[in-house]
Amino acid sequence: METINWKKIQKLDLVKQLTNENIPRLTNTTYKGYFSDFEYAMNKLDFLTSRNLLIVLLWNNSQKTLADIQKKGIFRATKQLENNKTILGSIIDDLLQTTEIISKLDNIEKEYLESIYNLFAIFPSLKKCQDNVIKEIKSFKNKYPNGSFIKTLMAWNDYLFVSSYIPDYTNDLIQSQTKEELSEAISYLIYKYTTIFQDDPIQFLIEMNYLESEEFENLVVSICTFIDIREKEINIDYFGYRCIFEKGRLIIKPPFEDFEKSLRLGYIRTDIQYLNDMMYNARIQEDSGGLLFQHFIEELINKSSIKFIHLNHTLNSTRYSFVIPEIVHEKILVDFLGTDRLFIDEVNYLRYLYKEQQLDFESLNQIKIKENLTLYEFIRIKRFFNFMFFAFSYEVFKIEKDPYTIIRSLVPVLTITQLYKIINPLFEKDKIDSFLELISWSRDSNSMLDLQYYPIYKSKELIHISLSVLANSSYIRNLYASEYSKGNNAIMSDGKKDLLTEKLEKFLKNAGINVHTEINVSTTDIDVLACFDSTLFIFECKNGLHPVNSFDLRGTYNHIKKAELQLGKIQELYKNGKLAQILKYNCDIELDDIQNISYSIVLGNRLFNGNIFDYPVRYISELVNIIETGNIHTEEGTFCIWEENRITAKVLLNYMSNENEIFKIYTELLNETRLSKKFFDSVIEMDTYEISTDKNAMSNIIKKYTNTFRKVEE
């Protein structure tokens, strides 16, 4: 095949050659070369070369070829926008009509190609969206020559996080988006602006007229939908979702019903738990004897009559600026930034974080997010920005009710030298630099901008600070996600034993169960092995962040698929008797009396929890709760699933099984719904699930599965 001219050979001749000749399987080197040539030809809009190489690659190994295409996102319409034109639709259309190739594909592969072809119908709308973005950005420059596009958008975004509601002047479509979705759209627009104008002069004026315009509102809504479509492409590429064309509408469907249910449940239950944790924290903070950020600021201002804001009348507008009087500079550094004691706000947030990411207090000083910066040092430096936020907001919101004036006052701009001068007495310059590197973004960054991950925009020697985002978002979770995506895997560990494994081991031992951890077996290992009566429990533990979108979700999904491979190897070793020999030799464990064996995957987040994979998937905090108390909390009260006054092997085995009642309650509480969005000339819908609001139905479902449990008096 080395002599084939890919640009000239006819499809029928190529297919005949593949069909009639005994062509050997491509070597890895040849495959990589062909795939690279195919990718290059696609980018160069070379239809014949792309089509012919793809035919050969699919004929050779369709599974690997499509997996590589999916991994690189080659068939995603949003990626094709980078070239402004595309041959993707023509390639897929031609391929689907090539019977000799399609007949070699399995049903999943055929459905994938059909989904790509159907979703590609949205490309003209994507193109209109992209053209509109460029038009609006250039139009802003012409209409508002003295205005700052970047600061205007950053200020509007910052207001979302400080107000907890969308400004009154926005339309219904904007109000249907979450502040996180809107923030992602604003981030995308700023990123696009920096790609269009490379040497934009520094401007500081926030243009309220633009924020009030219909053009701005429509632009933000269209970008929210654009980002949503990118996520749907990820769902198709990674998770087996399908796109069908029905009555002029594009409909995204999950690979199977319980897959989407497990996702929605994970997000719903995480949100509920967060609210419960915050309510609990609010109840106990009065008895803690600690100090709130807000109280510290109030006391400082009220007792000293010091003002941290100054009203300015510049550039034909009114705004407040933040100032730190020299007289309180030392007190702020010593009492606020310098203290080793954690504020109540920090304790509450960290208490939630410890549970969600399996951390503990000692981890703060042990986990290095940079070579010269620990997690605890990061928290302490961030206090300066917390101070700015609380001091500014306490004074401004007390005297100013006009949202426009507030928006104009947001996003303070400092020089890096000014920041050094304020913070440097307590922290070395290299630590401040590392801190800024972690949460800052500039035109030269090798990543897309997301203001929730990078709330500081650097432009030459100036830093624009999204103060409300930095103070009110889940900053450590976002820090972890940002660093983990860059390959900083050490951030998920304190350098000792895996934190999730350690937690499970602790609670199993507390229950009197014989536990062994990190056992090497053949070509894999067992994270946690528990011998409980006549049952052997094997847990594969995978720690990871709670995913906030489909992009993050890939990490959790990959963890599960890797765990399945490991458990599959262990299961095979048990079947052929080799596992018994290894455990006897390594741990002095006899399997002669084992009557039951349970294989399961334990995660550090709630996504995909249930029984939709080859092995049960359970969330670590819920698993240890079953081991420690056996209690489950419902709208009908608290129930204990223990049959005795302690956990038994029978109860634990049932909880880890596909027939577990708890997960049946969860799935039956969901109702199917279809979400619909209009996007220029296209309508795209998705079948998903939401929690039932029918209280009677909820009550009946809970009673149906808890009637055999013991109710706990509260």
Image (cartoon, rainbow, N blue to C red):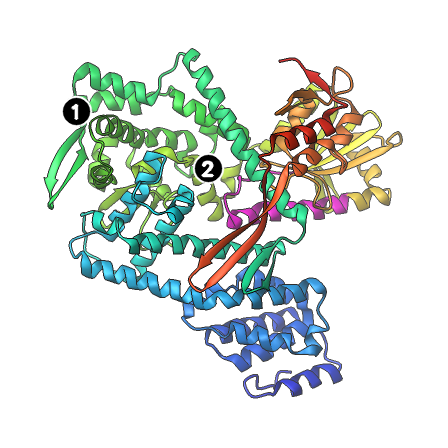
Q: Above or below — where is 404 with respect to 305?
A: below
Q: Which of marks 1 and 2 is in front?
A: 1
Left or right: residue 202 compared with residue 59: left
What distance separates the C-alpha of mark 1 from that of mark 2? 33 Å
Q: Which percent across, then down, holds residue 444?
A: 32, 55
Q: Can you say which quadrant of the picture contains the N terminus?
A: bottom right
Left or right: residue 641 compared with residue 292: right
Between disc 1 and disc 2, whose residue precedes? Answer: 1
Q: Residue at x 62, y 27 (%)?
A: 503
Left or right: residue 148 compared with residue 695: left
Numbered label attached to residue 307: 1
Q: Which percent across, then down, holds residue 686?
A: 56, 53
Q: Can you say which quadrant of the picture contains the C terminus?
A: top right
Q: Mark 2 points at which residue?
A: 477
Left or right: residue 169 compared with residue 104: left
Q: Which amino acid type is shown beneath numbered disc 1?
A: Lys
Inspect this view and state whether residue 254 appears.
Answer: yes
